[in-house]
Image (cartoon, helix red, strand yellow):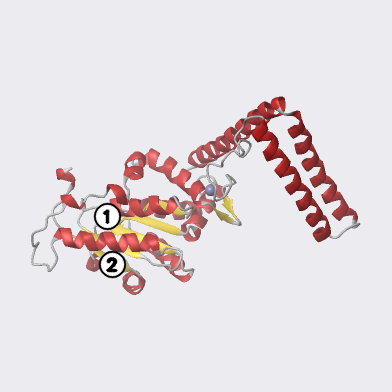
Amino acid sequence: MDEKSLSAVNKQFNQRKKNRDVLLAARREEVYRMSPRIREIDDAIFSGGLSMLSAVWDGNESPEQVAGGYAAKTEKYAAEKRKLLKEAGFAPDYLEVPYTCPHCKDTGMHGDKLCGCYLSLMSEVLFEQSGMGKLLKKQKFETFDLGFYDDTPYEGRPLSPKKNMQLNLKICMDFVRDFEEKADNLFLYGNPGLGKTFLSSAIANALLERGVSVLYQTAGQITDILSDARFGRGESETATFFKDQLVKADLLIIDDLGTEFINAMTDADMFYVVNSRILSEKSTIISTNLSLEDIKRVYSERMLSRIMGHYQTLCFYGKDIRSMR
Ligand SMILES: [Zn+2]
């Protein structure tokens, strides 16, 4: 987590805005050449906006009066513009270049919150650094294959690995469906190679498409962020930024809990993240190879009690399916 990654994200983000501006400007010139009247209309709309501002500023008219008149005029101009475009042979929406992200209109912000597209770009940059980016992007519900799981009894459990995965899959899909309605939390645990990371990325991908802000980090990255912020290491603005996002993002996915270096300080840090998110009713997904007994042994008792009290627990068992792909 360094200054370089953040500036790589900002660079891509600015490029996106620039591409749209350039395309829009080129299309405008093209249209103006064909239909000079449209330029006059655009100029009139622009100067109308300016005089509206100055009328309010001078106190001659109330903002409502001015805005009402302006809206009516603009609507008349817009109708004329559509007609002219059509006459010149352009599509009616030719001058409405779509935003890469319609949710935030490429500003990267929703009010005072970062938009999901910004965090998604950030995750991509981080994943590319960890070499996981492309893999995670491909992991979607549509590509999840239950065919890899065995349908015979496993170690005396009532559900076969396949039936169990059907259940896990349903819980994850319901989590996505109801995401905006309730702040649910999921605890995915069990042996490696059974699809925990796959399902958490599928959730992340589905929600990112809806503009939800998702932050996907390994437990190790999270404790690094917090200790960087604490000791003022690296660029302090970047450290504070990421620390904030750990609590503010709509969904935080903590991958591989238990693989980080654990001491009293990192234990307290991880508890801080998990607990703050519960208090502020933000959803969290934890995936781990540890069992619940391990959690109690490795972390403090209070961590286990938060998980037991506030998370749906999804157990993963069966034979490692990675060898079968
Ligand atoms: Zn956005």
Mark 1: few/some/many CA within 10 Å (<14, 14-19, 20+) = many
Mark 1 near ligand 1 (CB under 8 Å)?
no
- The residue most toward the front is 87
Query: For the residues marked 2 and 1, what is the alpha-carbon distance in whole angstroms?
Result: 12 Å
Return the residue at label 1. 196
Q: Is residue 43 left or right of residue 196?
A: right
Which residue is at 80% across, 60% downward? Answer: 64
The image quarter containing residue 271 is: bottom left
Quadrant of the frame with the N terminus: top left
Query: Would you say 320 lies left or right of 303 here?
Result: left
Query: Which amino acid type corresponds to the residue marked 1 in the rendered image?
Result: Lys
Judging depth in this view, the residue of 4 and 191 nearest the camera is 191
Number of other residues with Cα within 10 Å of mark 2, as a class: few under 14, some 14 to 19, many 20 or more: some
At a point 59% along the width and 46% down the height, the residue shown is: 107
Residue 284 percent location from the top left of the image: 39, 62
Instruction: Answer yes or no: disc 2 within 8 Å of ligand 1.
Output: no
Secondary structure beneath label 2: strand
> Would you place residue 224 above or below residue 284 in this image?
above
* Residue that carries the numbered disc 2 in the rendered image: 313
Name the element at disc 1: helix
- Asked if disc 2 and disc 1 are in contact, CB closer than 8 Å, the reply is no
Can you say which quadrant of the picture contains the C terminus? top left
| Sequence order check, earlier mark of 2 and 1 | 1
Instruction: Return the x and y of residue 296 as percentages of the image width and height.
Output: 27, 69
Vertical arrangement, residue 311 with respect to residue 209, above or below: below
Q: Nearer the viewer, residue 291 or 112?
A: 112
The mark total stands at: 2
- Amino acid type at circle 2 is Thr
Residue 9: tell me if it is visible: yes
Would residue 1 be visible to someone looking at this image? no
The quarter holding residue 90 reads top right
**Above or below, comparing residue 300 to residue 97 in the picture:** below
